Image (tube, grey):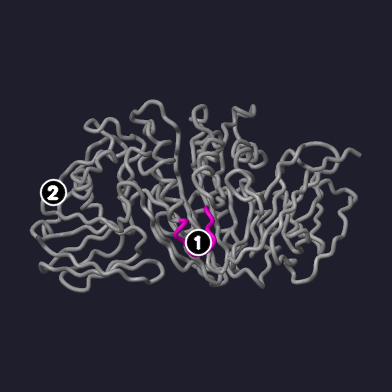
């Protein structure tokens, strides 16, 4: 039998113990019948027990000596072996951009050995930094459907320094997560996922996990197929896996179990897909993964994936999304999402009454780096999270570049007409009817990303619910006057991206009609934290 061995590098970390609290002996690794993958998970030369190890299908745990065995009959379908890094540990090494938690397998006969080394880390006070939709293309020609030719420069020299400086300000360990669409498959001839990985790794010193987005999938023609189906979805992830590792996996930090999923079901290519659909192989793996969780340490689950599970009516939008929630129903769930290029918070409960909160993150690229502003006015930003006992306790927006330190935008109707035409996706210019009552009253639009409620304390009346379309015309014209006009692409602004138009609704924009020269409002985030604004007529 042909054996393939990999060098085991042992790095010293003081005070390591086995995960189950027992003492790890030095039991030798040996072959088991029908098992073609095996190895060890160690810390300071001692085996770490109870660590979940998976090939994307099966999930096993290391024994008291830190040894594991997997019987993986379909290596062409499961090209990685990965560990679920246990709570209180990090990998000793970095693998490209992220932790060294996976190994690429080979589709060969015989036994393959993969060893992992860990170090202990105090994770009682850690910070998670999340980004979404960076869309770096290294464009060489600007135009209506292209990205800015400055995108790579802005990413490396504008965003990454802010990302690192914020991480440096955090009191405990810092981890990153990218929520998909880091690049675009159609532009891989200029800028690949490997380029993204290397640029990001060169700009930050903390470890970054990655989720896959629709633009990170391979075209089916590249593997000789006319389309993908449930069985061969794994082929659409080849480039992502080669550069960044598994497309679905898990890890643990503190009291949280993190699950990264691919909920983009690709039909043909990056723009031919069904969002919020998860193939049955992932769902089967997820059931096994959650069964392996140590519930004495883990209090909640954080899901990271590309597309939202809640629709615009704030209802769970698909059968497979409901299945994910049912599988994880015994835990509080925090769901981190990209894809939509806007800010939104949705809440619900699991079938067991546990809390669910879903946060959609704005695009890091704004409007593809032409303008660091998303479709509903949210600035390009990353978000910082803190957790306690399995649930998020803090979410902070961190804009960069021209919008750094901005918390909200205010727009009034004192100078702007209510009848400014906005070109819809149909190309038809429309005008909205004016509200005659409000025409003669001062009104202010408050755009407060990351907020979920706005109360008027005194001096006016606030429109409840989400953004009223009747005021969208003057609101977007005020964006134009605020030098943010490249968000709109039409004959007047031909170099704006024609694939992105102003959002039709938002849950963080409120219209306040003033009844006195001074208006006091309170803004609340998901956690009930209050920020008071006093608006004074000029």
| Disc 2 residue crowd, few under 14, some 14–19, many 20+, Cα 10 Å | some
Residue 179 image point, x, y percent: 50, 49
Checking the image for residue 416, the label placed there is 2
Q: Position of residue 327 (x, y in %)?
A: 62, 62
Q: Where, by quadrant of the figure, is residue 68 drawn?
A: bottom right
Label 2: state its secondary structure. loop
> How many numbered marks are there?
2
**Is residue 173 rendered magenta in the image?**
yes
**Quarter of the rendering containing residue 515:** bottom left
Q: In the picture provided, is 222 more to the left or to the right than 374?
A: right
384 or 484, which lies in front? 384
Image depth: mark 2 or mark 1 in front = 1
In the figure, is residue 486 to the left or right of 263? left
Please name the residue shown 8% across and 58% down the image.
Answer: 440
Secondary structure of the residue carrying tag 1 is strand
The residue at which mark 1 appears reads as 127
Q: Give whichever of 346, 411 is nearer the camera.
A: 411
* Quarter the C terminus occupies: bottom left
Q: Residue 26: x and y, percent?
A: 85, 61
Q: Residue reaching furthest left?
A: 440
- Residue 135 place in picture, x, y as percent: 45, 39
Residue at 41 percent across and 46 percent down: it is 159
The circle on residue 376 is none
Whole-angstrom CA distance, mark 2 to mark 1, is: 42 Å
Is residue 258 shown in magenta? no
Stretch of the chain drawn in magenta: 167-176
Q: Is 401 placed above or below 534 here?
A: above
Q: Residue at x 75, y 53 (%)?
A: 10
Residue at 52% x, 64% y: name it.
172
């Amino acid at each position: 039998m042909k054996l393939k061995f990999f060098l085991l590098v042992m790095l010293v970390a003081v005070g390591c113990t086995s995960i189950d609290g027992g003492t790890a002996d030095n039991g030798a690794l040996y072959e088991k019948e029908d098992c073609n993958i095996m190895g060890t998970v160690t810390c300071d030369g001692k085996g770490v027990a109870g660590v979940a190890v998976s090939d994307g299908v099966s999930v096993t745990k290391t024994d008291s000596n830190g040894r594991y065995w997997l019987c993986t009959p379909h290596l062409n379908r499961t090209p990685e072996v990965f560990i679920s890094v246990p709570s209180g540990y990090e990998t000793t090494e970095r693998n490209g951009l992220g932790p060294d938690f996976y190994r690429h397998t080979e589709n060969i006969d015989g036994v393959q050995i993969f060893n992992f080394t860990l170090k202990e880390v105090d994770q009682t006070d850690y910070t998670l930094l999340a980004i979404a939709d960076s869309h770096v293309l290294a464009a060489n020609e600007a135009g209506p459907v292209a990205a800015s030719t400055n995108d790579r420069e802005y990413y490396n020299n504008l965003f990454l320094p802010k990302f690192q400086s914020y991480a440096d300000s955090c009191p405990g360990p810092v981890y990153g997560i990218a929520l998909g669409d880091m690049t675009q498959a159609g532009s891989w001839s200029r800028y690949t996922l490997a380029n993204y990985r290397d640029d990001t790794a060169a700009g930050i010193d903390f470890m970054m996990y990655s989720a896959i987005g629709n633009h990170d999938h391979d075209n089916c023609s590249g593997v000789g197929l006319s389309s993908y189906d449930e069985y061969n979805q794994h082929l659409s992830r080849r480039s992502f896996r080669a550069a960044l590792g598994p497309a679905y996996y898990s890890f643990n930090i503190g009291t949280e179990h993190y699950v990264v999923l691919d909920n983009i079901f690709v039909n043909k290519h990056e723009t031919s897909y069904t969002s919020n659909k998860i193939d049955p192989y992932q769902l089967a793996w997820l059931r096994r993964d959650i069964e392996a969780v140590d519930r004495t340490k883990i209090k909640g689950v954080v899901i990271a994936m590309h597309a939202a599970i809640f629709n615009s009516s704030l209802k769970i939008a698909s059968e497979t999304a409901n299945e994910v929630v049912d599988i994880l129903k015994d835990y509080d769930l925090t769901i981190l999402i990209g894809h939509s290029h806007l800010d939104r918070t949705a809440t619900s409960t699991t079938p067991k009454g546990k809390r669910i909160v879903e946060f959609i993150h704005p695009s890091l690229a704004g409007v593809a780096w032409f303008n660091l502003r998303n479709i509903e006015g949210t600035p390009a930003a990353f978000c910082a999270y803190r957790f306690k006992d399995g649930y998020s306790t803090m979410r902070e927006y961190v804009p960069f570049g021209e919008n750094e330190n901005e918390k909200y935008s205010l727009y009034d109707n004192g100078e702007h007409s209510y009848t400014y035409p906005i070109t819809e996706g149909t190309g038809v210019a429309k005008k909205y009817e004016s509200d005659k009552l409000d025409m003669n009253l001062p009104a202010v639009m408050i755009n407060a990303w990351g907020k979920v409620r706005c109360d008027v304390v005194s001096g006016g009346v606030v429109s409840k619910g989400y953004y009223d379309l009747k005021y969208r015309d003057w609101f977007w014209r005020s964006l134009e006057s605020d030098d943010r006009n490249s968000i709109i692409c039409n004959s007047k602004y031909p170099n704006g991206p024609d694939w992105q138009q102003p959002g039709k609704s938002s849950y963080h924009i409120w219209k306040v009609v003033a009844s006195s020269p001074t208006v006091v409002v309170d803004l609340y985030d998901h956690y009930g934290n209050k920020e008071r604004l006093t608006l004074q007529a000029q």
